[in-house]
Amino acid sequence: MTNLPSILLIALLAGAFAPPVFYNPLEPKPEAPQGIRLPSTFLERQVRQQLVLLPFYSVFDNLEFRVDGGTVELLGQVVNPTLKTDAETMVKHIEGVERVENKIEILPPSPQDDRIRLAEYRAIYGNSVLSRYAHQAVPPIHIIVKNGHVTLEGVVATEMDKNIANLRANSVPGVFSVTNNLKVENSGDR
């Protein structure tokens, strides 16, 4: 016999850790008559949702994209080479996508960069001010490490959070440089 309260608890927990949905599920999906392109905003929502749902997408990867008509250009950097392929495969299957240009960079394997990634993660997400960002399905501060150089990508709530992330990233030994590309929510630099 199945324990109903246990099943409900598991279902609630699974929902709590599910990635965010970027579109309104109550909104009807626009159907495109043959030869007519879907609006970019619909494609952008669909591409964003598919990229966030990729199983190996982590805080050490940065996935970006541009939509131009039916063409989607994938950009960014990934640690795991299969993530580049998975991103392209997922986006190709979205209705309205006619072509995918995959310009995602695969970061070179390096034990030193792996050490820096973990140290950066601890320095940034271990901070009492920034730790609240770690509780999301895909934390919004992405740490990209290439040959000892660190780039911070993503979005934070305040300018202070951006500055703290920069200070924490610069505190990690063995880092050659830190580029802070974090954007602040509700500011004009998005």
Image (cartoon, rainbow, N blue to C red):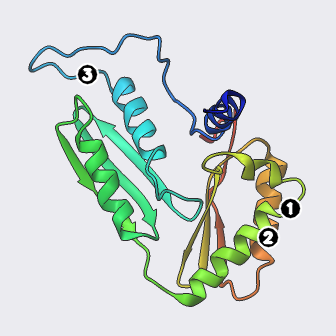
For label 1, the SS is: loop
For mark 3, give the secondary structure.
loop
Q: Are marks 3 and 1 in contact (CB under 8 Å)?
A: no
Label 2, on which residue? 123
Q: Which residue is mark 3?
A: 38
Amino acid type for the residue under numbered disc 3: Leu
Q: Position of residue 7 (x, y in %)?
A: 64, 33
SS at badge 2: helix
The C terminus: image quadrant: top right
Residue 103 lies in quadrant: bottom left
Seen at 77% across and 70% down, the residue is: 122
Q: Earlier in the sequence, mark 3 or mark 2?
A: 3
Residue in view at x 56 percent, y 39 percent: 19
Q: Quick check: 83 left or right of 12?
A: left
- Tags 2 and 1 touching, CB below 8 Å: yes
Q: What's the CA distance linking mark 3 and mark 1?
A: 43 Å
Task: Give whichever of 188, 45 is nearer the camera.
Answer: 45
Residue count near mark 2 (Cα–Cα under 10 Å), binned few <14, some 14–19, many ≥20 = some
Label 1 crowd (10 A; few <14 / some 14-19 / many >=20): some
Task: Identify which residue, 137 or 146, lies in the foreground.
Answer: 137
Q: Residue at x 59, y 60 (%)?
A: 59
Q: Is residue 103 visible?
A: no
- Above or below 172: residue 28: above
CA separation in Å, label 3 and label 2: 43 Å
Q: Nearer the viewer, mark 3 or mark 2?
A: 2
Between discs 3 and 1, the one toward the N terminus: 3
Give, as a three-letter code, the residue at label 2.
Answer: Ala
State if disc 2 and disc 3 touch (CB < 8 Å).
no
- Identify the residue under disc 1: 127
Residue 95, image x and y in percent? 23, 29
How many discs appear? 3
The residue lying furthest to the front in this view is: 1
